[in-house]
Image (spheres, coloured by chain):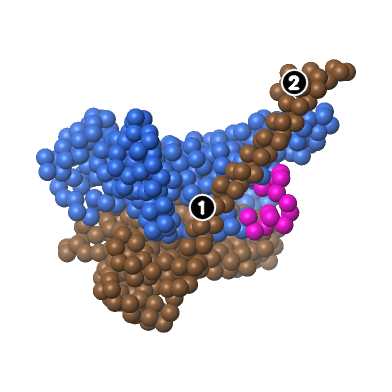
Chain colours: A blue, B brown
Amino acid sequence: MVAESFENAPPRAAASAKEPIRREGFSLSHLVESGFYWGTAFFAGLVLLITVLIAFQLWRTSLPAIHAFGWKFLTTSTWDPVADVYGAWPFIYGTLMSSFLALLLAVPIGVGTAVFLAELSPKWMRTPLSFMVELLAAVPSVVYGLWGVLVMVPALRPFQSWLSEHFSSIPLFVGAPMGYSMMAGGLILAIMILPFITAISREVIKAVPPTQREAAFGLGATHWEAIKGPILKSARSGIIGAIILGLARALGETMAITMVIGNGNGANISLLAPANTLSSALANQFAEASGQQVSALMYLALVLFGITIVVNAMARFLIWRMARDLGRAA
Amino acid sequence: MSNQSQKSITLTPSPSLMMRRKLANTLMFGGASLATFIAVVPLLLVLYYITVRGFSALNANFFLHAQKPPDDVTGGMKHAILGTLMIIGIASCLGLPCGVLGGIYLSEFGKNRFGAAVRFAADVLNGIPSIVIGIFIYAVAILPLKNPHFSAWAGGLALGVMMFPTIMRTTEEILKLVPISLREGALALGDTHWHSILKVVLSTARGGVITGILLAIARISGETAPLLFTALGNSGVNLNPNRPTASLPKAIYDFATNPSDYWHLLAWGGSLVLVAMILVLSIAARYFTANRLGESN
């Protein structure tokens, strides 16, 4: 077993390692050797075990709800713990809508900032700006939530009452301007994923071979055209990967959005209405749940688990494809 | 785009086209600058509030007293700071050895199907929302107890599960950078395989491994969601890991959602302490390696 594992050994050693070492009788050193191998293998396997166990546990505990509601759980909107009838659509809608709003705001601003940092900013601005971006990526979610509750939501209220006074004919802006709303949730998510999208997009733009840009300048392109061409050609899938990683973050984000989205149990089209996401519903209700509701909440967690796995896999695929394309171009 | 540049190759470039291209150039760069401005304003505001409000909350009471009734201005965050340290300690004791040993397996023995499956599982585990991990730990470590109760053990376990794949993957990446000749040298001198891995490979890569560990600790120390249903919280100082325990992030959450102004102030102070802690860990992580291998994300 030990001998087989000599993967990183040089060719000569590897050749001899193909033949398993067989020792006669008891050997302490051999025992320690295989003990070490199996010890490390155990801990590596533990990750596999935990991941499988999480999926299994979520599935097992949500079984009663799966049996009771089936696929209809995903599309119905009643969430009534008293009558024990549960439908997850308001939360799925809340998760998708808040993440969509966050991307709508953060993507153009983030990519624009990345272009500015990579191409335009004077040298003295780069270090403080990139330091700030890294610092903000380290600020915990709950601190963004605190800022959202005490600074952003009060500031949003006047803006929302202005919207509901002048634009209440548009269904997006109907309702009382309470501050705690889908709009606040989308906004706080946008602020949280902005540093993330900016940092990765900047790396991706910088990774484009300079020869492409130089060739564009040589053909008489303006500065913007020289950036636009290479970005559209080479960095596109990388930037899309960055956006999807940001999306994955937004989808699973819990604390900040739980604090500002207002804990409303309905799929309301209005951005001024309080809402819930899958994760905020879990955070708000899990502690007080009992019976069938626990199982329904576990079903929510299972849906969230599934969505994040798919989105993460998509992001990794896109970034992998970009690395491959760049490798081919070079 | 290609149409335009083909046109401009003709000997008499139309002045209106040049104007349009220059205009596009100005507009797009103006847009990029504007985007930077829009991005910087809220981010600066976040930093401004954390530092200014946070500093105004820090005094002796903040560090020496536990939570008191909302209007008592001698209350502090001692309970949360100690609780956070205890929970992070438990998480590190669990996640650190598991992660480093698993990483050794992946780097030294893991070029097989089992290794690939483990890598995939680690990436999946890294991407699972932290609240799902909290609920999982609640279901497997609290519910089956004879007398189900929240505890720092469970909170540490949840955070340890989050550290595990992160440390494992960074350890693997860093051990892979150790030159093969060092391994060969140790074996040629008659060292046993396990001893050479521990004494030669691991100690060569020590700086990078420590960086990975510190970044993993920094990442989990601000986590709130996994603690909601595991460590729960506590309004007093508690050093018994078998009981519900307060933590800085959870206390910030509780204080922020309470109307008391003084508690809001404490929450800002707690945020500043938490962010400073994470910052110190990240800077220490840099100190251990000149190149930033640990930041694979």
Q: Residue at image x 23%, y 34%?
A: A77
In depth, the one of B109 and A163 nearer the eye is A163
- Residue A63, above or below B102: above
User: Mark 2 or mark 1: which is in front?
Assistant: 1
Q: Point out the tag, 2 or 1, that comes first from the N-terminus.
A: 2
Magenta-tinted stretch: A117-129
Label 1 chain ID: B
Q: Position of residue A142 (x, y in %)?
A: 40, 58
Image-quadrant location for residue A293: top left
The residue furthest left is A83
Q: Position of residue B201 (x, y in %)?
A: 62, 62
Q: Which residue is mark 2?
A: B4
Q: Would residue B184 be found to the left or right of residue B167 on screen?
A: right
Q: Which residue is mark 1?
A: B42
In this view, B278 is above or below A103: below
How many C-alpha atoms fall within 10 Å of the one at disc 2: few (<14), some, or many (≥20)? Answer: few
Residue plotted at (68% across, 39% down): B29
Q: Residue at point 30% right, 56% down?
A: B137
Marks 2/1: CA distance?
Answer: 39 Å
Q: Residues within 10 Å of mark 1 (few under 14, many from 20)?
A: some
Q: Is residue A186 magenta?
A: no
For numbered disc 1, what is the local secondary structure?
helix
Residue drawn at (46%, 69%), measured in percent from left and top? B54
Q: Do we see residue A20 in this rendering?
A: no
Secondary structure character of the magenta stretch overall: helix
Badge count: 2
Question: Who is closer to the viewer here, B182 or B153?
Answer: B153
Residue A103 visible in image: yes
